[in-house]
Image (cartoon, helix red, strand yellow):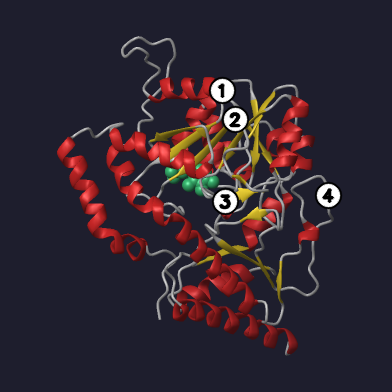
């Protein structure tokens, strides 16, 4: 049985009639850019997140870029961000002319290692960008304490974590700006590109609102140079249809993750990640060899609500990750390596100063070990069992190989 990595139709087609009605409404009123549905969607999203201001924007990437522009990042500034993330986090920093400085990550939750971040602060450091990777929050108390001690701005990349929480607070609302994406593979997937920027700061919200429309206020009078970061009314109207279902989508992802973990941890050599190896907060633990582990399952920390944008395995042993990927693909089970190349290893960043590309050993190791399997809400039990049986076949074959040399 084929199991796709993601099936957007399984989520969207049950809402087809409502989506068509939303489409028709926008078609008829004709206000296609920043129209009435943008305002109502922004209000609903702000309420859901507990943020004071929410701005619909053209993509998650543009939400990041707009946040950096509103904060006035410029050439000469240094900005800390994790080395293990999607390219947009680092690319948007570079686009402002600032220098991204890559920080190592935690082998348990894959998020920014705050001790390493502290080590990399210089007098040029202006901001830090925690990414809530795969749907789980970075350690925001540790990040914010570091930022406060060194006068840094904090911008949360919550592209994969809309609705996730840290100690009861929504990811994206614990800093100067939170950035989200509605790319179709994100948990609140849109119908094309789209994103959201939130802040609790009135002045920053105002600045971002002006920059979203080329920096003009009033129209055609420019005190600032912005860009076109506008949100399409159609996206807002269609996302408004999905928003009331969002909590249910999250519950289903969480149930899928629990189902995988319960069954996979029974297999030989399969363990859950050990929170004692956490590196995101203030304790530096030694690098990790879980006793005899061949495959490590992801966990959610107790203080986090994880929304499982990805369920990401670590496959231990040289070449083993690629072997598992090949055997899943041979059974037509979708899987993907998020991410095979760390930011400090990207060809476009090789011209950065050495100091901004050092000490990302955990990130490098993760890039060799990670594999994400299907976790989307509409997976049925037969599909989940197919994924589990394929992984079981792989690890059991590995055990046999090991015992018989
Ligand atoms: C998807 C993603 C982005 C960019 O969002 P787009 O809407 O695709 O531009 C930024 N950061 C992270 C971590 C992402 O996963």
Q: Which residue is mark 1?
A: 71
Label 1 with label 4: CB-CB less than 8 Å:
no
Question: In what element is the residue under mark 3?
Answer: loop
Label 1 with label 3: CB-CB less than 8 Å:
no
Question: Which of the two labelled residues, at mark 2 and mark 1, occupies the earlier sequence position?
Answer: 1
Q: CA distance from mark 4 to mark 2?
A: 27 Å
Label 4 with label 2: CB-CB less than 8 Å:
no
Disc sitting over residue 176 in the figure: 2
Sort mark 2 into few (<14), some (14-19) or many (20+) by Cα contacts within 10 Å.
some
The one nearer the camera, 402 or 140, is 140
Is residue 56 depicted above or below 83 in this figure?
Answer: above
Mark 1 residue CB less than 8 A from any atom of ligand 1 = no
Question: In what element is the residue under mark 4?
Answer: loop
Question: Which of the two labelled residues, at mark 1 and mark 3, occupies the earlier sequence position?
Answer: 1
Q: CA distance from mark 2 to mark 3?
A: 17 Å
The one nearer the camera, 366 or 31, is 31
Question: In what element is the residue under mark 1?
Answer: loop
Q: Which residue is mark 4?
A: 284
Coordinates of residue 53 in the picture (x, y in percent) = 48, 31
Mark 3 residue CB less than 8 A from any atom of ligand 1 = no
Mark 4 residue CB less than 8 A from any atom of ligand 1 = no
Question: Which of the two labelled residues, at mark 1 and mark 4, occupies the earlier sequence position?
Answer: 1
Q: Which residue is mark 3?
A: 164
Question: Which of the two labelled residues, at mark 2 and mark 3, occupies the earlier sequence position?
Answer: 3
Q: Nearer the viewer, mark 1 or mark 3?
A: 3
Q: CA distance from mark 3 to mark 4?
A: 25 Å
Classify the position of the C terminus by image quarter.
Answer: bottom right
């Amino acid at each position: 049985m084929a199991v796709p990595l993601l099936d957007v139709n399984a989520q969207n087609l049950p809402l087809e009639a409502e989506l068509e009605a939303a489409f028709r409404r926008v078609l008829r009123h004709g206000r296609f850019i920043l129209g009435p549905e943008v305002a109502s969607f922004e209000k609903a999203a702000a309420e859901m997140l507990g943020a004071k201001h929410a701005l619909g924007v053209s993509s998650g990437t543009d939400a990041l870029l707009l946040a950096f522009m509103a904060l006035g990042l410029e050439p000469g500034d240094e900005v800390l961000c994790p080395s293990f993330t999607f390219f947009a986090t680092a690319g948007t920093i570079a686009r402002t002319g600032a220098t991204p400085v890559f920080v190592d990550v935690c082998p348990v939750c894959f998020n920014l290692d705050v001790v390493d971040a502290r080590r990399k602060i210089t007098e040029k450091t202006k901001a830090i960008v925690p990414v809530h990777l795969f749907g789980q929050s970075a350690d925001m108390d540790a990040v914010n304490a570091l930022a406060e001690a060194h006068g840094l701005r904090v911008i949360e990349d919550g592209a994969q974590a809309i609705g996730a929480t840290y100690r009861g607070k929504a990811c994206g609302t614990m800093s100067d700006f939170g950035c989200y994406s509605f790319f179709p593979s994100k948990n609140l997937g849109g119908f094309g590109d789209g994103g959201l920027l939130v802040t609790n700061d009135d002045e920053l919200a105002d600045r971002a609102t002006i920059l979203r429309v080329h920096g003009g206020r009033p129209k055609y009078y420019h005190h600032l140079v912005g860009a076109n970061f506008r949100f399409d009314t159609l996206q807002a109207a269609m996302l408004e249809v999905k928003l009331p279902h969002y909590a249910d989508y999250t519950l289903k992802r969480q149930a899928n993750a629990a189902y995988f973990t319960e069954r996979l941890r029974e297999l030989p050599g399969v363990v859950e990640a050990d929170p004692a190896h956490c590196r995101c907060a203030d304790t530096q633990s030694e690098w990790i060899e879980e006793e005899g582990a061949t495959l490590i399952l992801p966990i959610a920390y107790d203080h986090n609500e994880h929304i499982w944008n990805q369920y990401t395995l670590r496959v231990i042993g040289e070449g083993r990750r690629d072997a598992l990927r090949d055997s899943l693909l041979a059974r037509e089970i979708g899987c993907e390596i998020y991410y095979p190349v760390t930011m400090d290893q990207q060809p476009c960043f090789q011209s950065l100063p050495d100091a901004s590309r050092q000490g990302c050993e955990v990130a490098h190791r993760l890039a060799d070990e990670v594999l994400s399997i299907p976790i989307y809400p509409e997976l049925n039990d037969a599909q989940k069992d197919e994924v589990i049986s394929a992984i079981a076949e792989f690890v059991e074959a590995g055990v046999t190989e090991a015992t018989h040399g």
